[in-house]
């Protein structure tokens, strides 16, 4: 089985479907033409072997770097060189559980 993500004109993932093994090599054509779904389809991998990570609805496809990105969790978070979202303040060490407070831009204990 192969997984394919449909992206819109803004490269936002709007659908993720699985194609049968016998269609894997031509998955884009199979989805867009044979099934008449149209649109742009890009293969993704649930085991993260291609394009950084598995595409999820609401995430984005970065065509320049050929990777799928998770949705940005908060406006203050930025992408690092590995294409992971990072907060402006590192997660505290220790055993406590913390939640991000976007208004204060800090971690608070839960």
Image: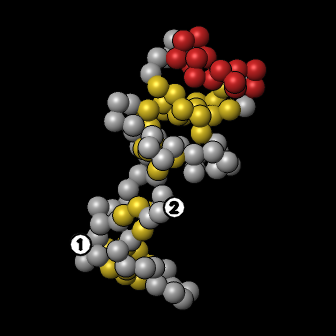
Q: Report which residue position mark 2 lands on.
A: 82
Q: Residue furthest bottom?
A: 94
Q: Estimate the spatial distance between the alpha carbons at disc 2 and disc 1, rounded to whole Å.
A: 26 Å
| Dot 2 alpha-carbon crowd within 10 angstroms: few under 14, some 14 to 19, many 20 or more | few
Taking depth in this image into account, of 90 and 104 the one nearest to the observer is 90
**In the figure, is residue 44 to the left or right of 79?**
right
Q: Earlier in the sequence, mark 2 or mark 1?
A: 2
User: Which sits in the foreground, 29 or 59?
Assistant: 29
Q: Which residue is mark 1?
A: 103
Check disc 1: other Cα within 10 Å, few if <14, some if 14-19, many if 20+. few
Q: Nearer the viewer, residue 86 or 107?
A: 86
Residue 15: x %, y % from top left? 48, 32
Q: Does 74 appear above or below 96?
A: above
Q: Secondary structure at mark 1?
A: loop
**Quarter that holds the N terminus:** top right
- Residue 68 spot, x, y in % from top left: 50, 46
Residue 23, percent across and down? 70, 20
Residue at x-position 45% and y-position 79%? 91
Q: Residue at 59% x, 39% y: name it.
A: 44
The correct choice, above or below, for 20 with respect to 107 in the image is: above
The answer to whether any part of residue 59 appears in the image is: yes
Q: Quadrant of residue 78?
A: bottom left
Pick the front one: 90 or 99: 90
Q: Is residue 110 at all visible to an observer of this figure?
A: no
User: Relative to residue 96, is residue 43 depicted above or below?
Assistant: above
Identify the residue shown where x is 54% and y is 32%. 42
The mark lying in front, picked from 2 and 1, is 2
């Amino acid at each position: 089985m192969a997984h394919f993500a449909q992206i819109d004109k803004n490269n936002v993932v709007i659908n993720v479907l699985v194609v049968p093994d016998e269609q894997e090599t031509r998955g884009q054509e199979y989805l867009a033409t044979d099934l008449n779904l149209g649109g742009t389809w890009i293969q993704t991998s649930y085991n993260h072997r291609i394009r950084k990570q598995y595409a999820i609805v609401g995430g984005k496809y970065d065509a320049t770097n050929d990777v799928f990105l998770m949705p940005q969790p908060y406006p203050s978070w930025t992408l690092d060189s590995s294409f992971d979202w990072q907060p402006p303040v590192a997660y505290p060490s220790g055993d406590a559980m913390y939640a991000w407070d976007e208004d204060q831009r800090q971690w608070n204990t839960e």
